[in-house]
Amino acid sequence: MRKLGIIGGMSWISTRAYYERINKFVQKRAAPMASPPLLIESLDYAPIAAAKQADDWDAIAATLVDSARRLETAGAEGLVIAANAMHKVHERLTEAVSIPVLHIADSVGAAMEEAECKSAALLGTRFVMTESFYRQRLVAHGVNLLPPNPDEVEMVDGIIYKELMLGRVTRGAERALKTIITMKEKEGAEAIVLACTELELVVDTDANVLPVFDSTDIHCRAASDWILG
C-alpha cells in the first residue's frame, strides 16, 4: 500500500471522518487486519479561520504548503486536504511538492459523471458555493450547477461555521437543510453535492428527496483507491 498524508484540523470533526472512512474502505478490500499507512498533520484551525475572515488566502496557502512539505518529507507519497474550501489553494500545494494532491472536486465530478448526473445543486461554505475554484471542476465533468441563492448561501455558511464546526447539531439546522434540498428539487436539480465535510451531520445522505453526492465519502473512497494503487 502507498503511504497517504492527510492535512487535517479543518475541522477535527472532518479529520476524524477521513481517518475512519479510509481505514474502513481499505479494510474491506485489503488483507484481513490490514490498515492503511497514513500520516496526519492536524493543524490549528484558529489562525486559518482568522486569515479566511480577513480574506488572506496567501497566509492560508503558506500554512498548507508548509504542512504538505512536512508530510512529504516524512514519507507521504500522496496527499489529501481533509476540507472542501481549502482546495481554493490546491494549485499552490501541487506546485510546492513533488507528490500528487488528490482534488476533492475532481473525485466528486468523476463520481457524478459515472452516475450520468447532469444537473445538481452545490451546498457548502460561501467560498465553495459561490467561487469558481470548485464549481469549474464539476462543470468540467459535464455537470450543470444551479446558480447559488444568496440567502441560502448565508444560511448554510452560518450553520457550518457557527454550529457544525463547533460540534453542535440542532434540529433547526436539519430542518433548514431539508427545506433547501426540497427547493432545489423544485428548481430542477437532479442531485445535491454535499461539499462540506461537516454537512452530513445534519443531512441524511441516504434518505432524501434527491440523490446526495457526499464529498467526504467520495474523496475517502478515492484516497483508498489510491492507497491500494
Image (cartoon, rainbow, N blue to C red):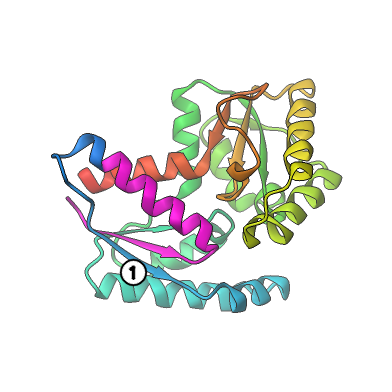
Residue in front for this viewpoint, 189 or 1 = 1
Residue 210 falls in image quadrant: top right
| Number of marks drawn | 1
Magenta stretch bounds: 1-26
Q: Residue at x 35, y 66 (%)?
A: 40
Residue 83 inside the magenta-drawn segment: no
Question: At which x and y percent is residue 102?
Answer: 39, 52
Asked if residue 229 can be seen in this view, the reply is no
Asked if residue 68 can be seen in this view, the reply is yes
Q: Residue at x 39, y 45 (%)?
A: 220
- The image quadrant where one finds the C terminus is top left
Q: Is residue 225 shown left or right of residue 218?
A: left
Q: Residue at x 49, y 38 (%)?
A: 108
Residue that label 1 marks: 97
Q: Is residue 35 shown left or right of residue 46?
A: left
Residue 42 falls in image quadrant: bottom left
- Residue 6 sits above or below residue 229 on the image: below
Residue 14 inside the magenta-drawn segment: yes
Residue type pointed to by label 1: Val
Residue 118 falls in image quadrant: top right
Question: At which x and y percent is residue 41?
Answer: 39, 70
Question: At which x and y percent is residue 194?
Answer: 60, 40
**Is label 1 in a helix, a strand or a loop?**
loop
